[in-house]
Amino acid sequence: MITDTSALLQKMLENTYAQADMYRRLSVLRQCVEYAVFTETSMSYEEECTLFLSKLDNREDAIAVQAWGDDVFRAFTKKNIGKLMQELQEKVDTLPLLKLYVAVALPEEEVAKIAKWCRAEVRDGMLLDMQVDPQVAGGCAFVWDDTHHDFSFHSRMKAVPGAITQELEKYAKNE
């Protein structure tokens, strides 16, 4: 059984990459363990959690929380649910956050790839705050350490006005 909030959070970060997903899944976890702890049946704690998660409409979150495993569920008792959930929330609030602006919404698999790379190359435990902004087509923009970085086609065009026109003129002369 995992009792340390840092170990619990590490387990949760194994399949949760976006800040919005983490907050939503923490809420699902709280509901799940409260249901399991305060429901008086002959089923085991783990069976109660599995039953609760099977009834959720949001299958993606249910599957993710279920994947955290019985050790995560067993960390919670009637006496520590509030305190442990508060500690987890506080730890999540302090995780490094990369606000990433992309032109279109990315599939979960791509978000996972980006987050894994960021965690390996930039900072461990990082969460992404994904924002869709069509203005960043042809690139992306991000905020890291309170600094905005824009690598979109639009920003490059503003940085070098007339560059495309010059290149097209060169091309036209060579034909």
Image (cartoon, rainbow, N blue to C red):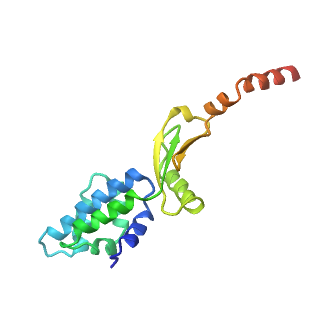
Q: Is residue 161 above or below residue 64?
A: above
User: On the picture, is 173 further left or further right than 114?
Assistant: right
Between 7 and 14, the one lying in front of the other is: 7
Q: Is residue 55 above or below residue 71?
A: above
Which image quarter is the N terminus in?
bottom left
Q: Residue at x 25, y 62 (%)?
A: 30
| Residue 155, quarter of picture | top right
Q: Residue at x 33, y 71 (%)?
A: 72
User: On the picture, is 107 further left or further right than 137?
Assistant: left
In percent of width and height, residue 137 lies at 58, 34
Q: Residue at x 26, y 61 (%)?
A: 54
Which image quarter is the C terminus in?
top right
In percent of width and height, residue 82 lies at 22, 65
Residue positioned most to the left? 40
Residue positioned most to the front? 146
Q: Is residue 134 above or below residue 107?
A: above
In percent of width and height, residue 17 lies at 45, 56
Between 147 and 88, the one lying in front of the other is: 147
User: On the picture, is 166 further left or further right than 64?
Assistant: right
| Residue 63, quarter of picture | bottom left
Q: How many marks?
A: 0
In percent of width and height, residue 87 lies at 31, 65
Between 87 and 71, the one lying in front of the other is: 87
Residue positioned most to the right? 174
Between 42 and 87, the one lying in front of the other is: 87
